[in-house]
Image (spheres, rainbow, N blue to C red):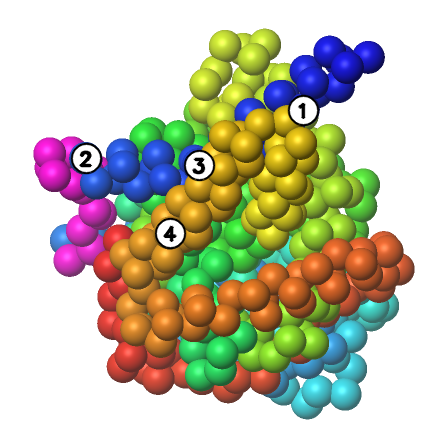
């Protein structure tokens, strides 16, 4: 019995240590590649064609409010690429009088409430006014850089079938917004930029993901409340050679600006992690069966728990090892220190605004809110738990602060 428990403890320790030390190893790889000049070249936009036979559908999913849609539509109408149509799905927006009289904008008002992002996307697809080769998914609070579709066109011209774009913060005016932005910068580095550097498939966000329309139609959903990105990436990564990342294609997302909004958002995210946990095993098993390191690595990281749970596990293992081995207890405290230091370095490396890095000293408050969110995950099975957004900013306002993020 003791031997079995010790074996289980060793396995758990190896898994937790792998996840927490992974960002440090990626930082080392990034540094070495930079020193040796081996980083992958950026896609240049200055020589891109402004018009292409490739047709894009920009799908905007709005729920209950259209207040933030005009700035996003405005940013899309200012694209330097011309072959696209914008589809605004106004779900449960019956009282909003917004209208559009523009040949590139289709405002769709479902007769019955959809109450799910997946259903809104399907509704848009079913109401395409023309065939589209590629669809791009936006939330209503997003903004797109003027080069956005132009860069995407080049990636699809290279043969990619699905491309995740670069999520950047639209607003960093409060402490929670900066902390939320810091988390995005960390994830951009570890799950996207470094995957690109290593020639591996990128994780996706629930927004700013572009893919061939035919590829999207191959995905079948059984659940509709949350987890859109969990399901879609687990399916398409098995269907295509590489899920690409385009750091040059920027989409700006509104960051939460208070603790209550953070709890609501993370409750939905944590619930989706557990609901779609099985898909990580499926991708991992598929990778092992096919002998694909790309798929196996992708699956391992789909199984990765939220960071605050990993840190809690590290402290728990340190406490347990006080009764087994003081050296191992010290090791776990060292792992925590190394992880936190790596997190700080990554944010410092990726940030555009100095305030994002300094906000990291308030991370304990952020973690506490996530713990409270964990205790509320059952609510996510009963409600859409939409995050309230209210920052009416136009693309010019954002570009004044961060014209082009470093990568």
From this viewpoint, which residue is outermost toward the left?
Answer: 36
Residue 333: image location, x then y, percent? 50, 43
Residue ID for mark 3: 21
> Which region of the structure is painted magenta?
34-46
Label ID, residue 9: 1
Kindly tell me whether residue 100 is visible in this rendering: no
- Marks 3 and 2, how far apart at CA: 17 Å
Assign a secondary structure to mark 2: helix
- Marks 1 and 4, how far apart at CA: 26 Å
Question: Which residue is at 73% across, 62% downward?
Answer: 373
Vertical placement of 395 versus 60: above or below?
A: below
Residue 85: image location, x then y, percent? 48, 63
Vertical placement of 97 versus 110: above or below?
A: below
Examine the structure image and report whether residue 39 is included in the region drawn in magenta: yes
Pointer 1 or 4: first along the chain: 1
Assign a secondary structure to mark 1: helix
> In the rendered structure, are the residues bearing label 1 and label 4 in contact, judged by CB atoms less than 8 Å apart?
no
Q: Nearer the viewer, mark 4 or mark 2?
A: 4
Examine the structure image and report whether residue 179 is included in the region drawn in magenta: no
Assign a secondary structure to mark 4: helix
Label 3 Cα neighbours within 10 Å, binned few <14 / some 14-19 / many ≥20: some
Q: Nearer the viewer, mark 3 or mark 1?
A: 1
> In the rendered structure, are the residues bearing label 2 and label 1 in contact, judged by CB atoms less than 8 Å apart?
no
Residue 322: image location, x then y, percent? 62, 35
């Amino acid at each position: 019995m003791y031997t079995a428990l010790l074996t289980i403890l060793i396995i758990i320790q190896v898994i937790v240590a792998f996840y927490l030390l992974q960002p440090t190893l990626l930082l080392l790889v990034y540094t070495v590649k930079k020193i040796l000049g081996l980083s992958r070249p950026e896609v240049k936009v200055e020589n891109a064609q402004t018009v292409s036979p490739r047709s894009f559908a920009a799908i905007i999913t709005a729920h209950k409010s259209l207040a933030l849609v005009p700035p996003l539509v405005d940013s899309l109408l200012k694209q330097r690429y011309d072959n696209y149509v914008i589809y605004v799905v106004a779900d449960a927006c019956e009282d909003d009088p917004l209208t559009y009289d523009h040949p590139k904008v289709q405002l769709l008002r479902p007769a019955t409430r959809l109450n799910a992002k997946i259903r809104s996307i399907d509704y848009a697809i079913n109401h395409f006014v023309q065939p589209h080769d590629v669809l791009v998914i936006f939330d209503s609070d997003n903004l797109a850089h003027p080069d956005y579709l132009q860069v995407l066109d080049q990636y699809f011209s290279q043969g990619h079938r699905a491309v995740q774009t670069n999520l950047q913060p639209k607003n960093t005016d409060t402490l929670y917004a900066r902390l939320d932005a810091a988390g995005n910068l960390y994830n951009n580095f570890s799950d996207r930029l470094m995957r690109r550097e290593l020639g591996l498939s990128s994780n996706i966000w629930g927004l700013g993901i572009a893919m061939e329309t035919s590829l999207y139609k191959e995905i079948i959903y059984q659940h509709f409340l949350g987890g859109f990105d969990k399901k879609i990436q687990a399916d398409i990564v098995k269907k295509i050679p590489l899920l690409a990342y385009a750091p040059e294609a920027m989409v700006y997302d509104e960051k939460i600006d208070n603790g209550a909004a953070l709890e609501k958002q993370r409750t939905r995210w944590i619930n989706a992690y557990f609901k779609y946990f099985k898909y990580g095993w499926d991708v991992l098993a598929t990778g092992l069966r096919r002998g694909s390191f790309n798929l196996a690595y992708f699956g391992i990281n789909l199984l990765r728990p939220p960071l605050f749970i990993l840190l809690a596990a590290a402290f728990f293992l340190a406490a347990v090892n006080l009764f087994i081995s003081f050296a191992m207890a010290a090791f776990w405290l060292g792992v925590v220190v190394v992880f936190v230091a790596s997190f700080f370095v990554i944010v410092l490396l990726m940030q555009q605004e100095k305030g994002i890095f300094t906000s990291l000293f308030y991370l304990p408050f952020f973690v506490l809110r996530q713990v409270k969110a964990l205790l509320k995950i059952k609510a996510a099975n009963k409600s859409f738990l939409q995050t309230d957004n209210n920052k009416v900013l136009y693309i010019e306002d954002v570009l004044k602060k961060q014209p082009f993020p470093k990568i």
